[in-house]
Amino acid sequence: MELKTALQRGSKLLEEAGVSPARLTAEVLLCHALGKDKPYLYAHSDEELSQPAWIHYGRYLHERMEGKPTQYITSRQEFYGRDFFVSSAVLIPRPETEHLVETALRLVPKAECAIDIGCGSGAIGISYHLESGAPTHLCDLSAEALDVARYNATKLTAPVTLHCADFGSALRARSVDLILCNPPYVPLGDGAVLQREVREHEPALALYGGESGVEPYRQVVGQALWALRPHGWILFELGYQGLDAVREMLSWPAWENLEVVDDLAGWPRVIAARKTP
Ligand SMILES: C[S@@+](CC[C@H](N)C(=O)[O-])C[C@H]1O[C@@H](n2cnc3c(N)ncnc32)[C@H](O)[C@@H]1O
């Protein structure tokens, strides 16, 4: 079978299974099966698909139709212009999370010491470190997630420091001037509103933030007052209903310069505040 036919058939199967965007997904999976990039696919569309590549492609299509996210099939996701390795031990970094890195770089172009709490794949902390050159710590409760972050740090030549710690202890005995955190923020009872791909494949530890969805914020803010140096900044990614509660946690007189940044869809996505001296 020629590559162009394989692409057409794959797109059709995905479309029938309700996967969107079908064509783009088929392209990514076929490229992954071939070990080639998209320009190759189109420049060699008359080439015959080898039997091993056909077997791999078939398996990938099947996995995707069963709901497995494309990124867990290809083991990669681009974030802030770099290629991150991902496995089912970590949340797939979202494009909206780039606003957190962008805001951090604007408010604190080069921290003396930064920390990414709940680092998952390391996308936030590694990107901030590589863009700013600031000494950066990454921590997560999941040892498997830390393995992924460590792999990405090595692959991207980012000499960050990794720790296994939970939200309540990550900042203990630490002095930092920038805290970055994208905590799990889905309320426990809201699993049903998540897409099937997310609910069934992404780690529960990365998704659910207790009964209210804001408990992890409270834990980090409680620690932050002790760990942040005067004028230090704290930045969180926001969930779909956390704004009011988190704004309340970051109110004056302990905090100043509160700022909320919307994402491209107009949703409040990042909240930032500076510790009063
Ligand atoms: C929403 S994910 C964010 C991952 C990554 N920072 C990103 O933006 O793609 C939340 C992360 O927090 C970690 N986590 C969950 N509960 C935690 C806790 N109690 N202490 C520390 N980390 C925790 C999860 O393992 C997960 O990696």
Image (cartoon, rainbow, N blue to C red):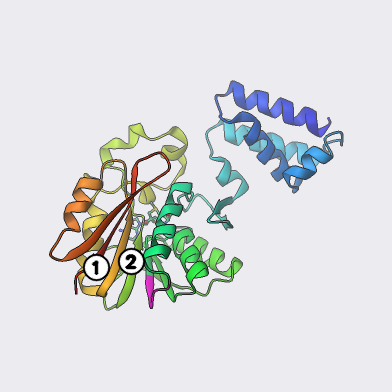
Sequence-first tag of 1 and 2: 2
Q: Are marks 1 and 2 in contact (CB under 8 Å)?
A: yes
Task: Name the residue rendered at 42%, 34% in the picture.
Answer: 195
Q: Is mark 1 within 8 Å of ligand 1?
A: no
- Asked if the stretch drawn in magenta spans residue 77, the answer is no
Q: Which residue is mark 2?
A: 179
Secondary structure beneath dot 1 equals helix
Task: Name the residue rendered at 66%, 37% in the picture.
Answer: 59
Gap in angstroms between the C-alphas marked 1 and 2: 8 Å
The quadrant the C terminus occupies is bottom left
Q: Nearer the viewer, residue 39 or 252?
A: 252
- x, y (%) of residue 114? 38, 71
Secondary structure beneath dot 2 equals strand
Left or right, 272 with reference to 83: left
Rendering quarter of residue 54: top right
Taking the view exactly as shown, the residue that stands out farthest to the right is: 47
What's the magenta region?
Answer: 110-114
Q: Which residue is mark 1?
A: 224
